[in-house]
Every structure is written in C-alpha cells, then in structure tokens.
C-alpha cells in the first residue's frame, strides 16, 4: 500500500513532515521500487488528496501508466481524490472509491 496524501508537489521535503503533503519525486521512487520488487504482487495506492502542483504531474502519470501490466495497480479513494491526485489515479488500472468518497475536480 502506497499512500498519496495531502497536497502534491515536486519536492515537499520539509513540508511533508509539517503538512502531511506528498513529494512526487519521492512517491515516484517508492512506486518504482514496488514495481521492481518481486515480493510485491500488487500495488494499492491509498489516495486522500485535494491535488496540488502541476509540476512533475505528467511525469508521475507516465511512471504509473508505463507500469501497467507488470502487476495489478489499484487506486483507492479514501476519501478524497481531486485535481492532480485524480490525474495520477487515472493512470492506474482500476479506481475504487469508498462509499462516502469524492472523486473529481480536474
């Protein structure tokens, strides 16, 4: 399970600890490590994000999209997936939303 939480931005190093946001650079590295780890049979992305910066967004989408077919890729909306977060979620093979969750706002 790979979290995608809070505001999304390219680096977010110190801000991640303070605000709970996600560094897209770090997230991509963690995602690729899971893709290449033979002990991981599927990747579930736990999403709770209102979105964020457009910088590094297309590259993050491409990283996920190009991993399709390597193992199951599922995005779980828990409970918000909006804007930049939805762009990334759209690269996964499947999007699942909690009953009271919200998806949209691109």
Image (spheres, rainbow, N blue to C red):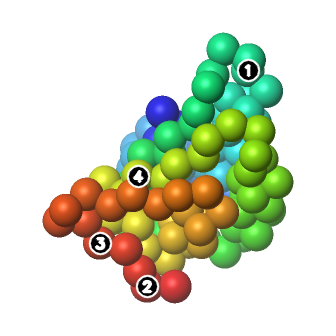
Residue 102: image tag: 3
Report which residue position mark 1 lands on. Answer: 37
Report which residue position mark 4 lands on. Answer: 76
The 10 Å Cα crowd at callout 4, few under 14, some 14 to 19, many 20 or more, is many
Which circle's residue, 4 or 2, is located before the other in the chain? 4
Which-is-in-front pick, marks 2 and 1? 1
Quarter of the image where one finds residue 28? top right
Residue located at (19% from left, 62% from top): 99
The 10 Å Cα crowd at callout 3, few under 14, some 14 to 19, many 20 or more, is some
CA separation in Å, label 4 and label 2: 17 Å
**Quick one: 48 or 25, which is closer to the camera?**
48
Quarter of the image where one finds residue 57? bottom right
Dot 3: what SS? strand
Which circle's residue, 1 or 4, is located before the other in the chain? 1
Residue located at (29% from left, 72% from top): 102
**Quick one: 61 or 72, which is closer to the camera?**
72
Residue 2: image tag: none
Which residue reaches farthest left?
100
x, y percent for residue 26: 67, 40
Residue 105: image tag: 2
As displayed, is residue 63 above or below residue 81?
A: above
CA separation in Å, label 2 and label 1: 33 Å
Dot 2: what SS? loop
CA separation in Å, label 3 and label 4: 11 Å
């Amino acid at each position: 399970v790979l979290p995608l939480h809070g505001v999304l931005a390219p680096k977010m190093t110190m801000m991640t600890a303070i605000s709970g946001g996600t560094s897209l650079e770090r997230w991509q590295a963690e995602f690729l490590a899971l893709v290449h780890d033979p002990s991981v049979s599927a990747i579930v992305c736990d999403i709770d994000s209102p979105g964020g910066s457009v910088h590094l967004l297309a590259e993050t989408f491409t990283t996920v999209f190009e991993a399709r077919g390597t193992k199951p890729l599922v995005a779980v909306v828990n409970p918000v997936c909006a804007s930049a977060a939805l762009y990334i979620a759209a690269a996964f093979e499947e999007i699942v939303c909690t009953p009271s969750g919200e998806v949209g706002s691109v």
